[in-house]
Amino acid sequence: MRIPISWLEEFLELGDIDPEEIAEVLSLRSVEATLDTFGVELEGVYAGKVISAEPHPERSDLLVLLVDLGPKGKVRLVTKDTGIAQGVVVLVAPAGSKVGGRTVDKKAFGSVVSEGLVLSPEDLGLDDASEGVLKVYEDIDPGTDVRTLLGFGEPILELDITPNRGDMLSVRGVARDISALLGLPKRNRTIPDLGDLGEIPIEVLDGDCHRYRGVVLEGLRVGVSPISVRRKLWQAGFRTINSVVDITNYVMVQEGQPLHAFDLDKLEGGIKVRSAKKGEIIRTLEGTEVTLSEEILVIADERRPVAVAGVIGGKETAVDMNTRSVLLESAYFDPKRVRRSSKKLGIQTESSYRFERNVDKEWVDEAQNVAVDLITRIAGGKVVAVRDVYPKRYEPRKVFLQMGRFIRYSGSEFRAEEVSRILTALEIPHEVKRCGVEVIVPSHRAFDLERDVDIIEEIMRVKGYESFPSEELKLPSRADFKEEPADLVADYLRARGLSEVINISYEEEELYRTLGLSLPEVEIVNPLVPSQRFLRSSLIPSLVRTAVYNDSHYNYDVAIFEVGRVFRRDGEELRVGILLKGTASTFPEREYDHRDLMTLVQGIARVLGSEVVTEMSDLPFLHPHVQAKVLKGSEEVGFLGRLHPSVERDLGLRGKVFLAELSVDKLWVETRTYVYEEPAKFPPVIRDLSLLVDKNLSVGKLLNEIRSHMGGMVEEVKVFDVYTGEKVGEGKKSVGVRIVFRSRERSLSSDEIGSVVEDLVCRLRERFGVEFR
């Protein structure tokens, strides 16, 4: 929204206050505001009165003007606008002047030399409905500087109004706020009063029209608006049309109340405010035909809709230069209904923008009275009828602000006199009481003042947040931080060099079918994207899709994870998914393999306070010989393995892809005891064992057996090699296991460890048929 500072001066005594200060205070305490300067660059451009207008001697499409520029002399000009008559004031850029950065030169049109340029609205960057040059019909002194006449160079406030501050969508509203913020006195205004007069057939048939006031004016002479009106509208960013329409826009900007004028002679019967009938059509002021539905509120006459209530008028009843009588509408329509109509039709106007944010229901008549006064002074005519239909009167709510509550929220004393001064400046009725203040919410703030905290906010912002005391935040000496399992897992994986990805929870069925997974159980009734109609039941499809996307963009080395929820009919579950692919390290060069995945899975389990083992699995989308299910005790908590080579080929993935998915909820142990040990003082004893075992025996089960049998003497057990081939025989595999022994009390001897290892091999032979190589 654009408001010229000069317009504000009609409401406030600004004195010598800097416009920059106004913009800064508004931004800090009210709405975001910036300053702009109105108009294009002009130098040596003046208003001139046409002394004579003669046809060009050689061209019938041109007119030769003699224009008086007062002290600047007379100039002869040639123009294509043949509608210019003697006595009209035009804006002249003589040769040598500058308009918008370009210099005007003399130009010959046949035998006549034009000594400058007669300016059009387009030349000046103005939006005007009239064709040809810009004409002024008031008595302007020849030689008047056009910059002064049009207000070029004036500062303009550009405001970004939040949806809850509809009261700021007018000059009057902004002036009220500035008055309160800067303590500036307001100027007194006198608005003519119009009581009910005559008869106007108005029927309000829909409850979403809370108030409808109509005024009939007759004997009008519709023409071009005075330059003072047009200047303000141009500065506010509006297009000028004609005197009556311009005044409705002028009052909307000034008072915040949208108005609409119907050509009374084009109406058929009385006015009815009703819901549209299905299939009704209206041709809007923009010239487009739109089909209406029952949810749209319209203004209609006896035969058809003539306006979409609060949004846009109809072309058939528009006011033009031939109009002699008008019905001037001022109304209050339900904000939600106006927004629904606007969205349904895809039409947003300055009118709908204000109605959606709530206009002042109690100012409907006053704003209209301002418009009527302007119309009768500018376009002539007289008022012959006034009718105000007000079925849903404004009932102000009362809000009591307790003194103690203000102190608790603001950290400042409650000064009744100061609070009263601020509320008075904001035009909010109130009564100061012994323990607080009772506020009667005015109609212009009915949209956003609902509770006592809203009143506290108003007092604090007007006073200035910087004026309230601030204290350092005091934290307890011993903070109690709750560990979140999702954060623990993410921190661990990021520390291991993986990148976190976040995918949406909506899935397509195509990738599930490619992977051979069951379709998700939870289907969305109204999906945003029709193909994404499921809530995911696994994190794996999303991770695979990310890998495919990276491959298509030549990024073949991927180490990613996601911590997120999956969905079933019986609830949700927090899981972590991992995908490794490509180069794990450059020096030495090494690609990711299943051992990297196993290390991460075991690390996640430890971070969450659990121990896990692995057993063979038979998931169809994983490599038949490189996969395992992950167990916590006897409970399955996830899986890991390599993506099936055929799936890798179908998806066009380059290289081997390793995947894991674990249930964070099942692995998480909330209550844990941390034991801190000092570094060992005695050296370790290391033994490497080569064990020949059944091919189907889980290596995880083998390692767990070793750990449980050896007890506290074993510091670490890990696999350093797994081999299958002809050398070990069919149905067998060789597993290389490294065991690190260490005692915290003494040094261990080789003989002692040898005896323990022999005992271990015997036990493994009995349990699993293991042979020692």
Image (cartoon, helix red, strand yellow):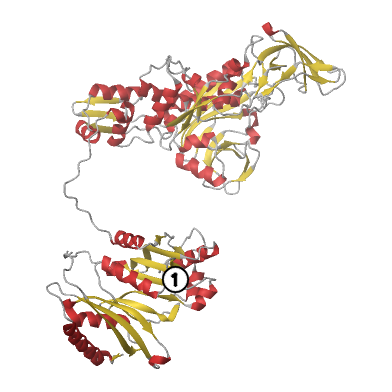
Q: Nearer the viewer, residue 583 or 278?
A: 583
Q: Is residue 119 visible?
A: yes
Picture coordinates of residue 464, whole percent (x, y): 32, 28
Picture coordinates of residue 118, whole percent (x, y): 72, 19
Q: Nearer the viewer, residue 401 or 397?
A: 401
Q: Which residue is mark 1?
A: 591
Q: Nearer the viewer, residue 343 or 764?
A: 764
| Quarter of the rendering containing residue 359 | top left
Picture coordinates of residue 164, whole percent (x, y): 40, 37
Which residue is drawn at the image coordinates 41% and 32% (left, top)?
Answer: 31
- Quadrant where the C terminus sits is bottom left
Rendered view: 462 above or below 754: above
Is 306 positioned to the left or the right of 746 in the image?
A: right
Is 773 positioned to the left or the right of 506 in the image?
A: left
Identity of the residue furthest to the top in this view:
71
Rendered view: 657 above or below 323: below
Q: Nearer the viewer, residue 727 or 17?
A: 727
Task: Assess disc 1: are there few (<14), some (14-19) or many (≥20) residues with their C-alpha within 10 Å of its C-alpha.
Answer: some
Picture coordinates of residue 396, whole percent (x, y): 34, 32
Which residue is drawn at the image coordinates 71% and 26% (left, top)?
Answer: 131
Is 349 positioned to the left or the right of 78 in the image?
A: left
